[in-house]
Image (spheres, grey):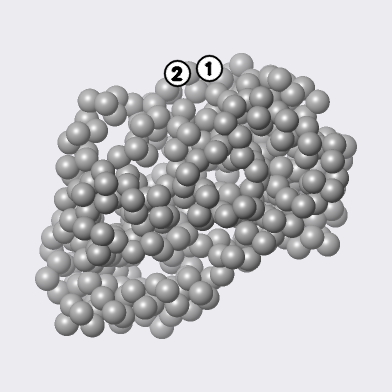
Amino acid sequence: MKINILSIAHKYPGQGVYSATEDHMYLLEKYSDYEIYQNKLFGKYDILHIHTINPKSFFSLLFHKKESFCVISAHIVPNSLKGSLKLNRFWLFLFRIYLWSFYKISDVVLAVSEETREELINDLKIEPEKIKVFRNIVRKDLFYTSQKDKESKKKFLRKKYGYSVNDFVVLGAGQIQPRKGIRDFFEMASELKDMKFIWVGGMPFQKMTDGYEEMNELINNAPSNLFFAGIVNREKMIDFYNMADIFFLPSLQETFGLVVLEAAGSGLPIVLRDLEVYKKIFNSCYLSGTSIQDFMLIFRKLKNDINFYKEYESKSYKLFDMYNEEKAFRELKKIYEEGVNSKK
């Protein structure tokens, strides 16, 4: 089969859609015998798989609709833009129509979580039978560190990056924007001076980022125990996961949260805001809170109670193992082949 993958996420590295597109390509190249093409506007393909909802992708969807089985990965729902891009309240209505058109015209919409599926149905009124839940994968070759190798790698990397082996390091990752809970991450660092905080990620959309001025103010006025590392290559992210003690993502809204799985591969106890989306995709393998006070209690317990820490270290490894590459490919292959056959 011939498959054409459409995505402009590579223009904006350091955000989740870029990672998801890269992982999709990796999955197909490793496990399939498909002929794989990228960003081809014309030609005949059995499958058109879209990751980014840019105008070129929309044109391709219209052009290939009759002959190709058209799949869209729903990385974005209307709520994703609140706290992400500037002035969204003025253009969100038009964007909602545009997004609805994309998903409506496609043959199948892949929701990255059950929560995303419900939002597609309830908010955008997409037909339930058109939506299939296909969760993101995590690459073992990039993001797995065994328990026996953790300590030696941590010791080496802390020396490399200027941290002490005795530091208790809290890591966060993602775009710097209000939706990711950057303000809470900043406040946690301000309160817990006996811990070190690192945030990996930047503002790939630059001045279009919601709260751009506020985010820059936080970066420029960060306390001495908080380091904003900026955007780093995915291959380098494993250094930060291996160097940290816990992973903290205080996002206010997520469709999935791929960085959570990446962090789990290094056995980092996961601390998240109490969001509904996480309950099914991450089960009971993480800790959650709703306030600064909640998070402070969790951090203190993880730092001071070795048995509690080990419990959630084990749960993170368990979570990582749940997202098996081969199983994910079998699910995707079934969706593709059933769709192509029905199209014919």
| Secondary element at tag 1 | helix
| Secondary element at tag 2 | helix
Q: Which mark is residue 155?
A: none
Residue 65 percent across, percent down from the top left = 15, 66
The quarter of the picture where residue 141 lies is: bottom right
Quadrant location, the C terminus: bottom left
Does the image show residue 40?
A: no
Give whichever of 295, 38 is nearer the camera: 295
Give whichever of 113, 61 is nearer the camera: 113
Residue visible at 54% across and 71% down in the picture: 325
Residue visible at 22% across and 38% down in the picture: 95
Residue 38 percent across, percent down from the top left = 33, 65
Tag 1 residue: 217
Quick check: 116 above or below 184? Answer: below
Residue visible at 67% across and 62% down in the picture: 318
Q: Residues within 10 Å of mark 2 (few under 14, many from 20)?
A: few
| Count of marks, rendered view | 2
Residue 306 percent across, percent down from the top left = 85, 45
- Marks 2 and 1 sit apart, C-alpha to C-alpha, by 6 Å
Quick check: 44 above or below 239? Answer: below
Q: Residues within 10 Å of mark 1 (few under 14, many from 20)?
A: few
| Left or right placement of residue 132 versus residue 58 in this view | right
Give whichever of 280, 153 is nearer the camera: 280
Residue visible at 46% across and 47% down in the picture: 277
Mark 1: amino acid? Glu
Tag 2 residue: 213
Mark 2: amino acid? Glu
Does the image show residue 74?
A: yes
Residue 293 percent across, percent down from the top left = 66, 25
| Left or right placement of residue 133 versus residue 40 in this view | right
Quadrant location, the N terminus: bottom left
CB-based contact (under 8 Å), mark 2 and mark 1 = yes
